[in-house]
Amino acid sequence: MRYDYSDIINLPHHVSKTHPQMSTQDRAAQFSPFAALTGYDDAIDETARLTGKKLELGEEAKEILDRKLQYLGRIISEQPEISVTYFVPDEKKDGGEYVTVSGNLKRIDEYERVVILIGGERIGMEEIIDIESELFTGDFYEGYDFRE
C-alpha cells in the first residue's frame, strides 16, 4: 500500500456549494489559546498593584496644618489658591495613595470636617497631610496670632 497521494495530488481544491467559506481570521481563532481561568490575569495584576500606607503626622506637623487651616478660614472670602496633599484610601485593598489637588478654596466645613474647593472637590480634614500656598512663604503665617 502506498501513501504518496499521487491519486489526488493534482485534483482541484474542493469548494462547498452549500456552506460559505470560512474567513482566515475565523479559521485562525480555532487555534487560539484557551483561557481556562477567566479573570486570573486580572486577579494577579490586582495583587501586584502597590498601595502606600497612610502616614501619621507628628504633633508639630499637625499644629502647622491646623494653623494653615485657621488662617485660610479667616481669609476664605478671598478664595485663596491652595494645593492640598491628601490620602485617598484604596477601594479594593489596604493602603492607598497620596494625591495633590490645586484650586481656589470655597469653604471649610468644620461640622463635616471637609475642605471644599471651587471645583467641587471635597477633602476630608483627617486625610490632609499638607496644604501649600503662596500665602505660606517665609514666616508669614507663623508670626500670625491665631488665638484671636
Image (spheres, helix red, strand yellow):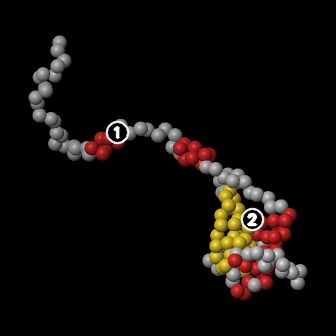
State the residue at coordinates (62%, 77%).
119
Measure how far apart labels 2 and 1 are at the Cα level: 55 Å
- Count of numbered circles in the view: 2
Quadrant assignment, res 116:
bottom right
Which three-letter amino acid code belongs to the residue tagged 1?
Gln
Residue 97 percent across, percent down from the top left: 67, 58
Q: Is residue 78 above or below residue 116?
A: below
Q: Quadrant of the C terminus?
A: bottom right
Q: Secondary structure at mark 1?
A: loop
Q: Residues within 10 Å of mark 1 (few under 14, many from 20)?
A: few
The residue that mark 1 highlights is 30
Q: Is 62 placed above or below 27 here? A: below
Q: Nearer the viewer, residue 28 or 141?
A: 141
Relative to 10, is 30 on the left or the right?
A: right
Mark 2 touching mark 1, by CB under 8 A?
Answer: no
Q: Earlier in the sequence, mark 2 or mark 1?
A: 1
Q: Residue at x 58, y 44 (%)?
A: 44
- Give SS at disc 2: strand
In this view, which residue lies farthest toward the bottom?
A: 77
Q: Outermost residue toward the right?
A: 147
Query: In percent of the image, x 69 and y 70: which residue is there?
Result: 84
Quarter of the picture holding the N terminus:
top left
Specify whether 133 is left or right of 22. right
* Other-residue count near label 2 (Cα within 10 Å), few / some / many at <14 / 14–19 / ≥20: many
Closest to the camera, between mark 2 and mark 1, is 2
Which residue is label 2 attached to? 129
Tell me where residue 140 sits by quadrant: bottom right
Which residue type does callout 2 highlight?
Ile
